[in-house]
Amino acid sequence: MPDDPELVGRLALACALGFAIGLERRLGRKAAGERTFALVALGACLFTVAGLGVSDDASPSRIAAQVVTGVGFLGAGIIFHRGDGGVRGLTTAAGVWAAAAVGVAIGVGQYLLGIVACALALLLLLLERIFPWLRDEPKPQAEDSPG
């Protein structure tokens, strides 16, 4: 088991990476922002680190599976159905899920994996600003012509 300073470093790194993803969401004027994403990554990292410290036979895959389940409920609360039959919040919910995965990766000591995943998540989220035609905007429906 890593020493306390390394564990604290893992928590801080997970929190910072989650914050970075959340900052992009906040700049895009989305409901969930820096604090939400930082807390999700921090929580996922803490569950992972604490779970690994409980016993020598704790399986990181079992811990990750439980984090995924818990974050799935949180993500479901972010998704809203619109009156036109569409949905809102899918990208933010997926971002929360990715932030949790980053937290788990940092929690098990896979620093490079977590940092690269965070960078890729940011790139994917920023693509909409680089290429505005990628925006998920509802398409106007054609009106029925009188027949």
Image: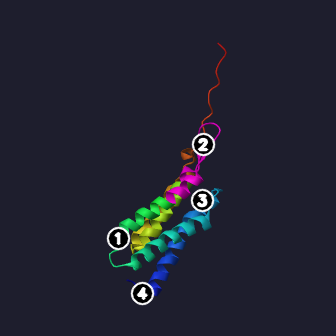
Q: Which residue is mark 1?
A: 59
Q: Nearer the viewer, mark 4 or mark 1?
A: 1
Disc 3, disc 2: CB below 8 Å?
no
The Cα–Cα distance between marks 2 and 4, rounded to whole angstroms, is: 48 Å
Q: Nearer the viewer, residue 19 or 57?
A: 57
Classify mark 2: helix, strand or loop: loop
The residue under the point 32% across, 75% down is 57
Crowding near pointer 1: few (<14 within 10 Å), some, many (20+)? few
Residue picked out by circle 3 = 25
Q: Which residue is mark 2?
A: 137
Magenta-tinted stretch: 71-91
Q: Within 10 Å of the Cα at label 2, are there few (<14), some (14-19), or many (20+) other Cα atoms?
A: few
Locate residue 68, reporting x and y percent.
45, 60
**Disc 4 residue type (three-letter):** Asp
Q: What's under tag 2, amino acid-wise?
A: Glu
| Sequence-wise first label, 2 or 4 | 4
